[in-house]
Structures are given as structure tokens and as C-alpha cells.
Image (cartoon, helix red, strand yellow):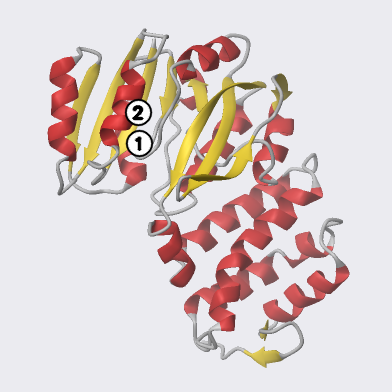
Amino acid sequence: MISIIIPIYNAEGNLRRMLDGVLAQTYTDYECILIDDGSTDGSCHICKEYENRDSRFFCFIQGNGGVSSARNRGLEIAKGDYITFLDADDSIPENYLSELYAACKDADIAVCDTVIYESGKETLRFTHESACLTGTEAINFLLSRKYINSGPCSKLFKKEILKDLQFPPLKTYEDILFVLDAFSRAEKIAVTDKTVYHYIQNTNGAMSAMMKEPSADIIVATERILQFISERKDLQPECTYVTVSHLYQYALPLLASQNYVGSDFIRKTARLTGKYMHLILSCKAISWKEKMTFFLFSHGAALESGCKIHRIRKG
């Protein structure tokens, strides 16, 4: 049996689309665990509606604790031999579970295509021809953000792989840390292009707000990933480059706004860069110009426009 875990918070506008997609699955041996994380709209009513409609649906209500808390509660409840995560705002085709289950029979984890949509248009696709990867190969794809998306959706996990594993109590990047831990435990990870997960990007959602006011959780997660990379000599240089670049995509808008003086996020980013400067300087995927920029930044200088360097006030 597959345990489907869906964290839900104020998703009444799209929730039925996802739940109807679950009902339409050609693979029918599943339980669908709905965790209402303190919704203030009609989401709870919809969950109860589907629980009364189909005996495979189970609704659980908790105070708002965030997506990690909701998913962790689902993990505690799950009774299936396999576990998959879905998000309430997204959608899946009717062969989603059947194809992932077929791919996972000879592997510890199965991964399918992910298509990201913004304003109804496809903007990005993670895809790889059907194959069986080693854990190291899959981690290289994950951390370099190629072929495999970073979230727990579009994946089917054997429950034994996730034993005692939980999502960290972060508001962002908690997903890639969980997946990274899971991949680290797996010997074989199957990828299939026979089905797809449709991720609907909310342009007014948490990610957009995070770019304006980045959370320190980003730095916490980045440090964990860089520490992991530093301990694994079998990973490709692109893993370091992409990890550092993702951190700086949040720092650069702050620098451009000229409001970075005294910024705690900028200060912590500089400190983290300095801590892992040995990793950055030895990375073959990072150009010398970029290495110099990171070096100057870590020593208290911020590159604002590509040619001007300004001092950061140290707190």
C-alpha cells in the first residue's frame, strides 16, 4: 500500500483538483492522509467531505505549525510500505501512482518528471529518461538542480528508507534537506519519464516574499548542504557552485537595493562564505572572477554593480 501525505493550509481554491486527481488514480491500493495545518478557509470542510466520500481518505487537523510539521505528522500516521508527498495546489495525472510504483519495485526511491507552471504556462521541466541511478548519481543531479527537482513531490519512497527521518523545522529549503537525507540512504534510485507531477507556482506566494525578505533558514540550510558536500569527495563541482549561487540569489537583491548596510542576512551570508571559502576556491565550476568576488564578500566587501565595491558595516 502507498501512503499519500498532503499538507494543507488555506488551499480551498485548488484542493478539490488535487483530491479528484487522487481519486482518479489507476493504482488504487493507497491511503490518503490529509493534514489540515490550521487552515482558516474552507479547506477543512473539503477534507471532511472527501473523508466521508471515500474510506481511503483520512483527515487530521492540527494548529498551524508549517509544512514540515504537517508532513512529519503524516509520516507518523502512515501505514503503507511506500510513501509519497503531494501538495494541495498541484495536480497529477491518473497514471502517477502506478508508474512510480512500477519504477520503485527494484529501487529504494522512484522519481518522475516535474513540470513547473507560472500563470498557466510551463516555465521549467525536470526530466530524465527512464533509468536506475546510484545514490551518488542522484545526489549530483539533485544538488546541481538538473533532471531531479529538489522537493519531496514527484517521488515515491520505500518507507524503510525514511525510518526516523523527518523534515527539519525550517520555513524554506526544508524540502531539499529531507530529499538529500533520503537519497543518502538509498542504493538505487529509479527515474521514469512515463508520468509527471504538475507543480503550480504561485507568483504571489512565499517564494516571491522570500526574495524581498530572505529568511535566515536559507543560510541554515545552505550550511548543511555545504557541510555535506565537503564530506563527499565523489560529488561533482557543480554541486558547490549551484548551492552557493542559490544563496547569493537572495543576497544580490538586497545589495542592489542599497539597504544592505547592517543587514543580518548579508552579514551571515558573508560569514558562511568565509567558513567554506576552501570549498569555493577549490571548486572547478567556479570561475576565478567569481571566486575573487566571494572572497572579497566574505572579508566584508559587497559587490553591488559588478564594478563598485562597498564596505559592509560589521555588527
Q: CA distance from mark 2 to mark 1?
A: 7 Å
Residue 178 % position (x, y) = 50, 39
Is residue 245 depicted above or below 315 in this figure?
Answer: above
SS at mark 1 in the image: helix
Residue under pointer 2:
5
Kindly check if marks 2 and 1 are in contact, taking CB atoms under 8 A apart as contact.
yes
| Mark 2 element type | strand
Horizontally, is 27 left or right of 311 in the view?
A: left
Q: Residue at x 59, y 58 (%)?
A: 223
Query: Which residue shows up at 87% across the image and 70% down it?
Result: 288
Q: Report which residue position mark 1 lands on.
A: 71
Is residue 226 at least partly visible in the picture? yes
The residue at the point 42 percent across, 9 percent down is 27
Instruction: Please tell me whether residue 123 is drawn above or below residue 278 in the rendered image.
Output: above
Confirm whether residue 77 shows in the render: no
Position of 169 with respect to 55 (left or right) is right
Q: Nearer the viewer, residue 163 or 43?
A: 43
**Nearer to me, 280 or 145:** 145
Instruction: Classify mark 1: residues with Cα within 10 Å, few (<14), some (14-19) or many (20+).
Output: many
The label number, if any, that marks residue 113 in the structure image: none
What is the x, y in percent for residue 126?
63, 37
Q: Amino acid at mark 1?
A: Arg
Front one among 24 and 138: 24
Residue 149 percent location from the top left of the image: 59, 39
Q: In the rendered structure, which amino acid carries the disc numbered 2? A: Ile
Q: Is residue 111 above or below residue 120?
A: above
